[in-house]
Amino acid sequence: MRRRAVHGLILLLAILGPTAAAAQSVHADLLALINRARADHGLAALRANGNLDVAARGHAADMAVNDFLSHVGSDHRTLGDRVAATGYAFAYVSEALAAGPRTAAQAVHLWLTSAAHRDLLLSPDAREVGLAAAPAPITSTHGTYWAAVFGRRFGEK
């Protein structure tokens, strides 16, 4: 009986995805890696922002569940729509997305080796960031979906 309970727990964990502790660890890894790259280029560190995290998490989950990679959501909302819906009043907003990397280090490496994504990570206009990783269902063509949403609040220099 105990063996069946353990197997049920493993199945439940597989369905629910990573634990909150694992998600926090990935978030911390992403933030540290992005800020290390910014420091290497003489830029200020980004602050984590809960509203931007919500926008990043929602879009990463949408892409994972619906098996697509795009800056426009399955509901046709844009980045600006998603960020505004969190209550974040922005003067600047951008996002970097990825599908497939298995670790935070791989995702950040992918972004830094793409000129367009590197420009986003190293933008002097960004002050805050929201980060997310969403594991895709086993039927997905990609593995984990990654989102980094960069912002600066309206009125902030």
Image (cartoon, rainbow, N blue to C red):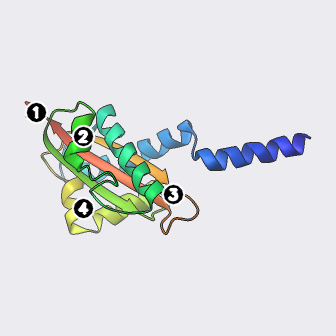
Q: Percent from the top left, x then y, of residue 139? A: 56, 65
Query: Which quarter of the rendered picture does the N terminus lie within?
Result: top right
- Where 70 sits versus 33, above or below? below
Of mark 2 and mark 3, the one earlier in the sequence is: 2
Q: Percent from the top left, x then y, of residue 97? A: 32, 58
Circles 3 and 1: CB atoms closer than 8 Å: no
Circles 4 and 1: CB atoms closer than 8 Å: no
Circles 4 and 2: CB atoms closer than 8 Å: no
Q: Which residue: 40% across, 46% down?
A: 132
- Disc 4 target residue: 117
Of mark 4 and mark 2, the one earlier in the sequence is: 2
Confirm whether residue 83 shows in the render. Answer: yes
- Disc 3 target residue: 136
Q: Percent from the top left, x then y, of residue 37? A: 28, 54
- Disc 1 target residue: 154
Q: Nearer the viewer, mark 4 or mark 1?
A: 1
As shown in the figure, which amino acid type bears the numbered disc 3? Ala
* Distance from the alpha carbon under mark 2 to that under mark 3: 22 Å
- Disc 2 target residue: 83
Residue 47 image label:
none
Q: In the image shown, does 35 or 95 lie closer to the viewer?
A: 95
As shown in the figure, which amino acid type bears the numbered disc 4? His
Q: Percent from the top left, x then y, of residue 71? A: 27, 57
